[in-house]
């Protein structure tokens, strides 16, 4: 049996600790009040007889107290309770030493793999993680109700980002970059006026991105359409300068050529500034800004041609990549790119199809951009097309007092996710039990989400001026409270979910891709959707249902349930749960069928949803990728590509990953040996999974594969 300690770690059950604790209490009571060896053995036997693979240490201690009372050892029970209370005080005084020391010694591999943009070796990043450990500890012991802390430890739910909960900051946002560029902003007490050129606008944008990232813990998104105006300003400035310099000396055609030449240089330099600044700037939490660039052309936009030029340059530079210290072009983790498909660029003969072809070519080598169908999005969001937030969550439509839709300048208050498979395991096929337990656990999730909401109530604009006073979210006055922005659906707060496939398998015996499984899975999704809508009506808070990539949580929930309930076929035996509504990776289903199937679930998960498909040998399969992109436009709101081939996520190498002389996996192009940043396909059966065993040349190697 595994005993789960208060810090969430698991240790083997050790009966000697119980014997020691009771004997210490024995020394403090009269002889006739002491527990005998037989009494102690009986207590231990009762605990073992529970036949559990996993028990919380508090539950074991509760049993000891109850059994001592049954033996009529009341004085001893009291002493044991006092002993337990004193031990709790010691724990409350200091509970983070070991985790922080492991971090400093670089022995905490879970943290090292948690974020692709965080290097836990670097001092500034370690400082952020140390603060995170303190926050997580205070959150568990002091800030959250004990019921929610226990639910988090038991895998009933996951309270996201506890490492930042001690501070009054939020998750992710859509920066109101248009307002900040057009009307100016303030950073570090210095006025930043509206830019007078495209190059300066790009520089200011990256400064804003860095400032925003330093004052929140999640991702942010920037709509690149706001830069088109500044590219035209530069063009008009260049034309004026050339005419003044060469008036009457050269023809209009030559003037046009010179202006175009200078504009292209400005465009290339500006986009390069964004790419290099984002990848070289470090925020105050010791990492690159977690930012998404939204590449969206709008019909009727007066700057659509300039924006088309900007999107083209962004895609060209992403395709090329950035050189690492060895001079090899690699794929930067950020900025992430989201490209919008619309009627004029969906590869059906539209004017901007050339941009989509370039986007597909970029995806084949760099795995980005992701794709959004404007057609499907308009169906789901009252005719609107807007960016997901950096964390890939979506806002609900919201209108200002003049009746205008507004998306930029809004944010997400936080996330709590529910473990669906665990409900199915406990229900064991009994639907009445399932729905009753489902509702009970949803209410715990609501309570946890309200903790997030309440932590933001009452804070003032001075907590983060870049957000609340200088335009990223709002233009509030000094000392003004943000409370109005927490209600009425202006901001969202998200209920995440893991394991639709597994819970369906547990309750029906079938995958949710079958008729029986599909009907049950849709009932679960509709219940989730109806629940968050009810919460929204009851509280006037923007609750939203959020299905999005959560790789580490898929492993965490599966690990907890495997330890607690043992190996269950097609559920805990895989070592991971399937994210949100996704089809299990082992099912034989083609890309088109998968996207079409998952689109129905996306429509119910409007607080966030993305689907992905695997394409073999992507760089040699551009036509296949283009066909999938066409299909995305007509059938699903949000999708991305992955590959079934060996693939290095550092440099974009799409070929066979080699085994070097040391018996390590190594990318032959850039030398990457980090297994969490590569796909390796098993040669014999093509298995893609968490663990990869090589029966190969020098020795067996086990590596964690991040992307399934």
Image (tube, grey):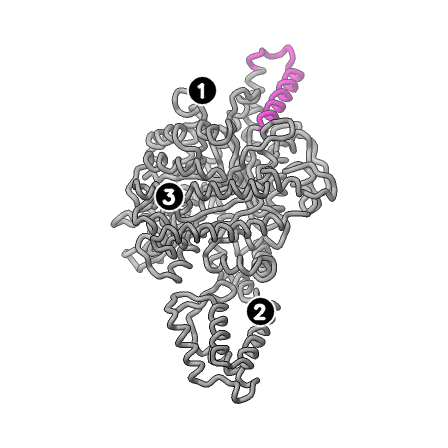
Foreground mark, 3 or 1, reads: 3
Mark 1 or mark 2, which is nearer the start of the sequence?
Answer: 2
The one nearer the camera, 351 or 247, is 351
Q: Mark 3 points at which residue?
A: 521
**Residue at left 62%, top 21%?**
238
Measure the alpha-carbon separation of dots 3 and 1: 41 Å
Residue 336, percent across and down? 49, 39
Q: Which one is nearer the viewer's eye here, 152 or 194?
A: 152
- Point out the stretch of residues depicted in magenta: 226-254
Q: Residue 351 carries which label?
A: 1
Drawn side of residue 115 relative to residue 250, left or right: left
The residue at which mark 2 appears reads as 91
Label located before the other in sequence (3 or 2): 2
Mark 3 falls on what kind of element?
helix
Q: Give the structural element (helix, strand or loop) at label 1.
A: loop
Between the residue at mark 2 and the residue at mark 1, the CA separation in whole angstroms equals 66 Å
> Can residue 97 be seen by looking at this rendering?
yes
């Amino acid at each position: 049996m595994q005993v789960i300690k208060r810090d969430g770690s698991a240790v083997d059950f050790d009966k000697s600790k119980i014997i020691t604790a009771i004997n210490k209490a024995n020394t403090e009571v009269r002889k006739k009040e002491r527990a005998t060896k037989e009494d102690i053995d009986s207590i231990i036997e009762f605990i073992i007889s529970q036949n559990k693979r996993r028990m919380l240490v508090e539950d074991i201690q509760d049993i000891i107290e109850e059994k001592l009372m049954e033996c009529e050892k009341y004085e001893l029970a009291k002493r044991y309770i006092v002993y337990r209370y004193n031990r709790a005080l010691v724990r409350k005084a200091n509970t983070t030493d070991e985790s922080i020391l492991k971090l400093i010694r670089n022995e905490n591999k879970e943290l090292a793999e948690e974020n692709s943009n965080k290097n836990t070796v670097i001092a500034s990043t370690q400082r952020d993680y140390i603060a995170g450990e303190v926050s997580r500890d205070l959150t568990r012991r002091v800030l959250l109700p004990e019921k929610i802390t226990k639910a988090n430890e038991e895998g009933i739910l996951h309270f996201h980002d506890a490492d930042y909960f001690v501070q009054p900051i939020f998750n992710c946002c859509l920066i109101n970059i248009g307002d900040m560029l057009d009307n100016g902003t303030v950073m570090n007490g210095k006025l930043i006026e509206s830019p007078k050129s495209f190059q300066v606008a790009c520089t200011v944008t990256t400064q804003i991105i860095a400032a925003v990232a330093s004052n929140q813990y999640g991702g942010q998104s920037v709509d690149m359409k706001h830069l088109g105006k500044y590219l035209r300003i530069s063009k008009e400035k260049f034309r004026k300068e050339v005419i003044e310099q060469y008036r009457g000396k050269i023809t209009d055609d030559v003037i046009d050529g010179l202006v175009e030449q200078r504009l292209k240089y400005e465009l290339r330099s500006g986009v390069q500034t964004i790419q290099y600044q984002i990848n070289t700037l470090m925020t105050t939490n010791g990492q690159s800004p977690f930012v998404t660039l939204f590449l969206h052309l709008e019909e009727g936009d007066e700057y659509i041609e300039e924006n088309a030029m900007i999107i083209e340059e962004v895609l060209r530079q992403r395709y090329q990549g950035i050189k690492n210290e060895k001079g090899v072009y690699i794929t930067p983790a950020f900025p992430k790119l989201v490209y919008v498909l619309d009627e004029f660029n969906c590869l059906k003969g539209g004017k901007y199809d050339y941009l989509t072809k370039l986007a597909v070519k970029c995806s084949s080598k760099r795995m980005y951009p992701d794709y959004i169908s404007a057609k499907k999005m308009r169906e789901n969001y009252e005719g609107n097309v807007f960016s997901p937030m950096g964390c890939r969550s979506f806002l609900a439509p919201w209108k200002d007092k003049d009746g205008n839709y507004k998306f930029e300048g809004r944010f997400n208050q936080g996330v709590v996710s529910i473990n669906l498979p665990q409900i199915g395991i406990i229900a064991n096929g009994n639907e009445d039990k399932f729905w009753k337990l489902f509702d009970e656990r949803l209410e715990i999730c609501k309570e946890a989400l309200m903790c997030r909401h309440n932590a933001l109530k009452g804070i003032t604009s001075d907590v983060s001026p870049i957000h609340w006073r200088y335009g990223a979210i709002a233009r509030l006055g000094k000392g003004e409270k943000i409370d109005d922005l927490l209600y009425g659906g202006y901001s969202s707060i998200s209920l995440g979910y893991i394991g639709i496939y597994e819970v369906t398998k547990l309750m029906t015996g079938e995958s949710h891709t079958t008729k029986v499984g599909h009907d049950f899975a849709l009932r679960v999704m509709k219940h989730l959707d109806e629940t968050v809508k009810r919460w929204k009506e009851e509280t006037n808070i923007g609750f939203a249902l959020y299905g999005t990539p959560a790789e580490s949580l898929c492993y965490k929930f599966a690990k907890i349930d495997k330890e607690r309930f043992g190996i269950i076929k097609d559920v805990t035996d895989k070592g991971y749960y399937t994210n949100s509504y996704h089809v299990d990776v082992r099912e034989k289903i083609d890309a088109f069928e998968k996207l079409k199937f998952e689109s129905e679930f996306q429509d119910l998960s409007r607080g966030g949803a993305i689907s992905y498909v695997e394409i073999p040998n992507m760089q040699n399969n551009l036509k296949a990728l283009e066909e999938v992109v066409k299909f995305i436009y007509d059938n699903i709101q949000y999708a991305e590509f992955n590959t079934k081939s060996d693939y290095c996520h550092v440099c974009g190498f799409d070929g066979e990953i080699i085994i070097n002389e040391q018996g390590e996996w190594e990318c032959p192009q850039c030398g990457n040996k980090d297994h969490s940043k590569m796909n390796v396909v098993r040669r014999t059966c093509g298995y893609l999974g968490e663990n990869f065993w090589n029966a190969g040349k020098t020795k067996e190697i086990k590596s964690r594969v991040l992307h399934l």
